[in-house]
Image (cartoon, rainbow, N blue to C red):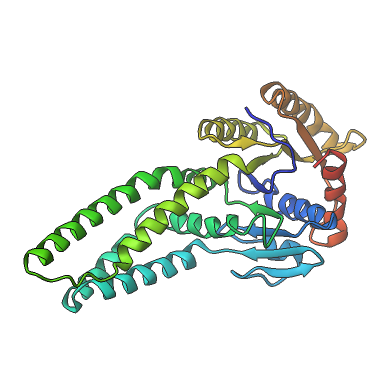
Amino acid sequence: MLLKGYSWPVAFIGGKGGVGKTTLAAAYALLCAGRGERTLVVSTDPAHSLGDVLAEDLGERPRLVDGSLWAAEISGADALDRRVAQVYEDAAEALPRDVLPAVRRHLAHAASSPGMVESALADRLAELLGAVPGEWERLVVDSAPTGHLLRMLNLPALLTPWVEGLVRQRERTRGVDRMLAGLAGRNDEKPDPLLERLRARRARLAETERRLREDATVHLVLLPERVPLAETVRAAEQLTAAGMCLGRLVVNRVVPSWEGGLLAARRTHQDEVLARARDHFVGLGMVQVPLMPGELTTRGELAGISEILRHDGW
């Protein structure tokens, strides 16, 4: 396991669904913005709730929330629609009109294939990474549940060889076209928008993969329960194997020691899980966020969590 400091510009907040990722992401973003750092917090979870937590009507375009804080909820489905439209536009410039209906049918089928939404989401993430540092100093990502996060983070490395193969294939086709044109005494080569876009995508994937490994850290969030801990252990192992760096673990909704009644009865189980988490993530560090009243959807409530993170050195 690798631990990076909190000065790194990109932070993913991940974990099992329902553990409080969105609340932690919003609180951390508010902490960064409160220090005067231009901060963008985005949700990539299909079940968006970042706007609810921040009490803002959010969409695809980053919106200024307060002071140095911007927020957005990005949709993989919308990003995929834009990509399909762009590919069709490129095809319309490079191919005969009579084959375009078949191209449209192929694109519709491809868009429904597994992994395409995550791929389009990774493209949108690449755009945001390109704006940090620059337009923003910090990017905080409220990610989808663990499985989706792992697929999205692994996609740049997985897609690069495939795109490189498409580039080589297209370059060979263009080479044959040039040779035939030369034999016919023609020199009417035109720009190839499809090849140019493939080359640009290849470069963008390589840059995204580099940025994810050099400039990003993943903070995993869990509840003090056995099942979330087991999933967190697996996610940490997979992220580390993929070359990602792990930041401090966040254990959310920890029952304070002074609570009585039913909550006190949960502490024995909770303390056992916390001990196992410390043993497994030794050297990584762990911050505990206590169980709090309310829905944690106001700036004042989020500020309490921000203060816990600040005190922990975030």
- Is 60 on the left-hand or right-hand side of 198? right
Q: Residue at x 39, y 46 (%)?
A: 160
Counting from the top left corner in percent of width and height, residue 202 is at 40, 52
- Is 258 on the left-hand or right-hand side of 227? right
Counting from the top left corner in percent of width and height, residue 72 is at 65, 65
- Is 56 on the left-hand or right-hand side of 149? right
Residue 28 visible in this rendered orientation of the protein: yes
Nearer to the camera, 216 or 232: 216
Q: Is residue 218 above or below residue 55?
A: above
Q: Residue furthest bottom?
A: 97
Q: Residue at x 58, y 57 (%)?
A: 130
Counting from the top left corner in percent of width and height, residue 142 is at 65, 53
Nearer to the camera, 260 or 23: 23
- Is 268 on the left-hand or right-hand side of 184? right
Q: Is residue 118 above or below residue 236?
A: below
Q: Quadrant of residue 71?
A: bottom right
Q: Quadrant of the C terminus?
A: top right
Q: Is residue 94 above or below residue 10?
A: below
Q: Residue furthest top?
A: 279
Nearer to the camera, 107 or 195: 195
Q: Residue at x 62, y 27 (%)?
A: 1
Q: Residue at x 34, y 56 (%)?
A: 113
Counting from the top left corner in percent of width and height, residue 85 is at 38, 72
Residue 146 visible in this rendered orientation of the protein: no
Q: Residue furthest left?
A: 184
Q: Quadrant of residue 273?
A: top right
Q: Quadrant of residue 99?
A: bottom left
